[in-house]
Structures are given as structure tokens and as C-alpha cells.
Image: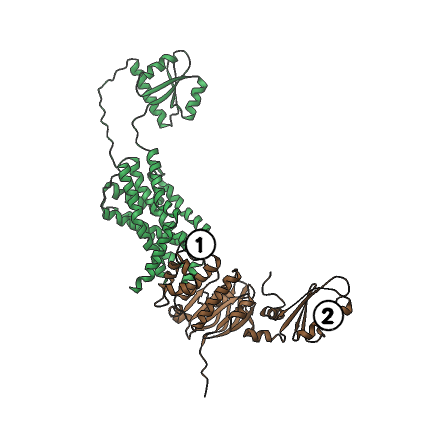
Amino acid sequence: MAYWRPLWQLTLSRFREQLRQPEVLFWVFAFPLLLAVALGLAFRNRPPEVVHVAVEAGPGADSVAALLNGARSVRAAVEAPAQAAEGLRKGGVALVVVAGDPVVYRYDSTRSESRLARLVTDDALQRALGRHDARAVADQKVMEKGSRYIDFLIPGLLGLNLMGTGMWGMGYAVVDARKRKLMKRLMASPMRRSEYLASFIAARLVLLGPEVALLLGFGMLAFGVPFRGSAVTVAIVVVIGAMCFAGLGLLTASRARTIEMVSGLMNLIMMPMWILSGVFFSSANFPTVMQPLIRVLPLTALNDALRAVILDGASLGAVAVPVVLVAAWGAVSFAVALKIFRWL
Amino acid sequence: MHTLMPAPAIRCANLQKRYKDVVAVAGLDLEVHAGECFGLLGPNGAGKTTTVEMLEGLVVPDGGEIELLGMRWAEHERALRERLGVALQETKLADRLKVSEVIRLFHSFYPSGRSVEEVLEVVELGEKRDAWVEKLSGGQRQRLAIACALVGDPDILFLDEPTTGLDPQSRHQLWGVVAAFKRRGGTVVLTTHYMEEAERLCDRVAVMDHGKVIALGTPRELIASLGAEEVVEFALGDGAAPPSEAALAALPGVTAVRRDGPRYMLTVSELHRSVPGLLAELQRGGVELTALVTHHATLEDLFLSLTGRHLRDE
């Protein structure tokens, strides 16, 4: 139908331009995967590690070291005092043992690995010297999928990617067209403004499918991240999230005349959310006074909704509050952007 | 018997635009006839671009009236857009679209129009149909811009400095495209600061300076208004006293004298009488000539005589 021709051609152009720019493909598709791999490797769940400690050289040092090395969970080495102190400072050893009576444990009590080393080392030493447990205990080890770091990370990266591609996809392209006077040239033709904006949204929605499928599929196949929610619910949350950030991107680009200006604005908006919105670590780590502010950020709400749906299989109703918040951000952004947009 | 005057394609009256404290267009009246090629000639900053962008409905005038094809922007914006073709000064179309894709995109905006194939043929970009825009030369890009303006089969074509920065061959190629559009009965409005372009392409020219029209007519009429057909330029060596401007003006056939440092410029109506007179005068004073050039008077000479300045500062 002739009525749809301009929208179809505009969307096609937009789509072709994106696919013909390798850098766009990298940021949309490759970057989140690389981030997932790198962080997944760095923070993988490892079997309990051996504790490395130094025994300060001196009388009795060798026998203490020998006793400790008898335990499977401790590696002890005799070192000169200066060397041992340096090891402790730089993190090569978690604890320095000074033989004598009493045996002295020197460590930084604010470091959790040092506190762990203190417990493990003391336990090994006391056992080697003949201590017995007062009561028999047994360990039962569990490692459940869905509660590992990578499980936390993948939905967060999805939210982050929706923010990045939505904002850059709108913001950069709009300002670029304005700077080239391409927008002015289009305004001189009978093209409707609504068609122009709709083409951005359409192109964004087309790219959204592969973008989301790739990241979630990779997480499931490579790391066994569980996918417990319904695909339809996830799709709804993803589309609302993508539209929200497309709106914010349009708002950011609504007046800017240069790429430098829109880049600066976009970083200003996105950087706080990179850190605060619980992408790489839980936003609960921030002080209570900051929580109301953090909870109202669109990426925080989107990440909460994505995690609940993907990891816990929550229904749309259960995530209604964050989803409505995300939608509201999008609606307000679009409305303001259209009001102040610089077309010429 | 009476002749029916064709309705003007464009009519504007008392058009005004100012940007902050700069007056870009200061009360402009123009009438462009259907089927003619109308040129706005003037130096940079004369207000040419502001004028055409107001006519194109891209800049809102501070005052005055515009009527195109009997319609006004306020009431008939969309109908007008469908009947105008526009090539702006320096539009960079999408880098990574193919030539044919860009034309097809613009084609989609018009309810009817010329086919992409036909337009490719007209602007001689058939061989480049599958090339990315970023791979095109300056002349090819400019022809693509005109193809986008032609694809809606417009009644009026606006070209803002279409050949600025192009080599002579590309310029001639582009003039051919404009001439072909005119042969189809189209109306053309173009801005330029090349007097040769205005003389070759335009039926009528408005010479602009400081936001006003300072002369209007066919190129031939404008040049004739100088009262002379030829220009004699010469330069003198150092030494003996140069002739006075009054003495030069008194030479046979000389209508105007202008001096620019060591260079003199005489506007003359009868070259065959003025040159021997000049040589005799210089010989009497014992002054040596270091250069002597004559050429037909051009719009450049007209602009110089009207404003005392050159069209281009080069």
C-alpha cells in the first residue's frame, strides 16, 4: 500500500545503514557477549581455595610451617620478616604466622580473605597439635543455578544493552542527520515527521530480536543461566525497556546540534545508571538514603523486572510496578522530546 | 487580441528576515515566471540562501508574503512540498546507502513522480547506481542531490549554489541537467556566485547585495546597463607620473574608469577607438605598460560597478 511506502523505505534505509557499519554491529552484538565472557570468567564460582600464609623466619618457624603444610587447606612458606610483611601488604599471602608462645597471627581484619585465613590456619594448627572436635558435624554442599554471579549478571547486561543501543541508536543517528542537514533536506520533501520517527522505532524493534536472543542464548548455552519466565513476558518487558531508552535517546538528541554535545549528554545520563542500577553488582550495596533515588532510575526498574522474569519466572503482574515505571519514563521522554525537537 | 500573461510561479513581496542583530534579507520583492530559470547572484552573505530557504518553506520570514504556484506555506504546506524539488547547499546524504537506494527513498515520499531509473539516466549516474554515497566524487554527489530533487517530478526546482567547489567538467554536466529540466517546462531558481553560471543558465538574474536586489533583468540587459560592452584592464610600471583618471575618462569611447592600486579598469563602448587612444596617451607621458587585457563585460563587472566590490574574494 502506497501509504506505508515512506515508512518502509525509511526503515529499510535506517536498517541498511546500521548493518553496513561494523562498529554498530560490534556495540550491539559483540560487546555484551565479550562483557559476559570476561566477567563470567573473572567471577566464576570456584572450589574452595588453598590459603597461602607466610611463617616469619625465626626459632620454631620450620616446625610450625611443617605442621600447617600437613593440612590440605593451607600452604605455608618460611620467609624473612621483611619479605613476609611485603607479601601481606601486596596480597600475596593473606596472613603472617609468627612462631613462639603465644603463636601470633598478623593480618588485616578488614579483609575477608585474611579473616578466612585466620580461621583455616588456626584450625589446621590446633588439629595438628591434637585438638579434637567437641561435636561431630557433616557438610552438605549445594550449588544452585540461578543464584550464581553469572546468573545475576546476564539479565543486568541485557538491561544495560537495551539502554546503550536505545540511546545511541536514536541519539547518534538523529544528531548525525541534523548535522549533515539530511534532516533539513527530508523536511523539504513531503515526508511526514511521524514517519521519520516511526522508522527509527521500527528499525530498533527489528534489531531487538537478534540482540536479545543472542545474549540470552549465549548465557543459557555457555553458562547454563536458567530461563524460567515465559518468553512472551520477557518479550513484553524487553520491548517496553527498549522503547523507554529510545525515548530517552530522542530526548537527549532533541536539541543537540553536534555529536560531541549529544555524546556528552548521553554519558551524563547513562554513567550513573551503569554504576547505580544493579548491572554488575546489587544496587542494595548503596546506602539506604540513596535507595529511593536508585529505585526510580529506569535501568534499575528494568533490571529488577528482567531478573524477576528471567530467573524467578515472575508473571507480568508480579513485575507491574517496575514495568509501569519504565513505561512512564519512556512516555514522558517521548512527549517532552517531541515538544522541544529541533527539526530544522 | 490579447496575450495571456502566465501566472507567476513564485511571487514574494517585502520579504524580511533577521538573525539576532544581522539583517539577512531586507525587504525583497521578486516575481519568477513559470518555465524560466531565475538566478540569484551575489557574494557570500548577500542573503541568497536565506531567501531561497524562505521560499522553500524551511525558514519562516519575519515579514512579507510568499506565494508559490498560487499557494501559501501556511495553508498548503503538504501540497507545495509535493510540487517542489530542493537541493540545499551542502547536504550530506547517508554515507552508506547506495545511489539508487537514496533516490528510491526520496521517491517514496511523493504520490507520483519519475521512476528511479529515469532519474538515474537524467543525472548520468546509471553506472554508479550500486555505489555507496561516500564513494562518490563532489560532482556525482551534487548530481545525486539533484536526482533526489527531480524524482518527485517537481514544477519548481530550487538549487542553492549547485556548482560551488566543482571542477569545470562537473559544472558543465550539471548545467546540462538543469537545462533538460527547463526543456520539460520546469521553473528553476538557483543561487550562485559564479557570474558565468548565471549568464549561461539564467533567463533572468537578480543581483543581490546586503539582503536587497540591486539589479534585475536578463543577463544581456544587465550588462548593457553598464553602457559598455568591453572592459580594458591594464597595469603600469614604476617611474613616470601615471595619467590622471580624468585624462583616461576623456579618451574616446571610455564610459567609466576605476583604479585599484597599480591596476586600472576602463569600461569602453568602442574598443577599436579606446585602445589606440590609451596607448597614445601613455606614450605621451612616457609610462610603460606592464599588462593589458581586454574582455567582454560580464555580470562581475556589473557587480563591481554597482558596489565597488568583487563577487568573490579570491
Identify the image quadrant of residue A140: top left
Q: Which mark is residue B135?
A: 1
Badge 1 or badge 2: first in the primary sequence = 1
Q: Name the one closer to the observer, B272 or B15.
A: B272
Image x and y of residue B75, in percent: 39, 71
Q: Relative to A144, is A107 above or below?
A: above
* Quadrant of the snapshot with the C terminus of chain A: bottom left
Q: Which chain is green?
A: A
Please say whether residue B26 is visible from this viewpoint.
Answer: no
Amino acid under label 1? Answer: Lys
Q: Which chain is brown?
A: B
Q: Residues within 10 Å of mark 2 (few under 14, many from 20)?
A: few
Q: Chain of mark 2?
A: B
* Picture residue at 32% right of the left edge, 42% below the top: A156
Image x and y of residue A220, in percent: 26, 39
Please say whether residue A173 is visible from this viewpoint.
Answer: yes
Count up the numbered dots.
Answer: 2
The kind of secondary structure element at disc 1 is helix
> In the drawing, does residue B294 fall left or right of residue A341?
right
Are labels 1 and 2 assigned to the same chain? yes
Q: Are marks 1 and 2 in contact (CB under 8 Å)?
A: no
Image x and y of residue B146, in percent: 44, 64
Q: Chain of mark 1?
A: B
* Quadrant of the snapshot with the N terminus of chain A: bottom left
Residue located beneath label 2 in the image: B279
Q: Name the one closer to the observer, B69 or A329.
A: B69
Amino acid under label 2? Answer: Leu
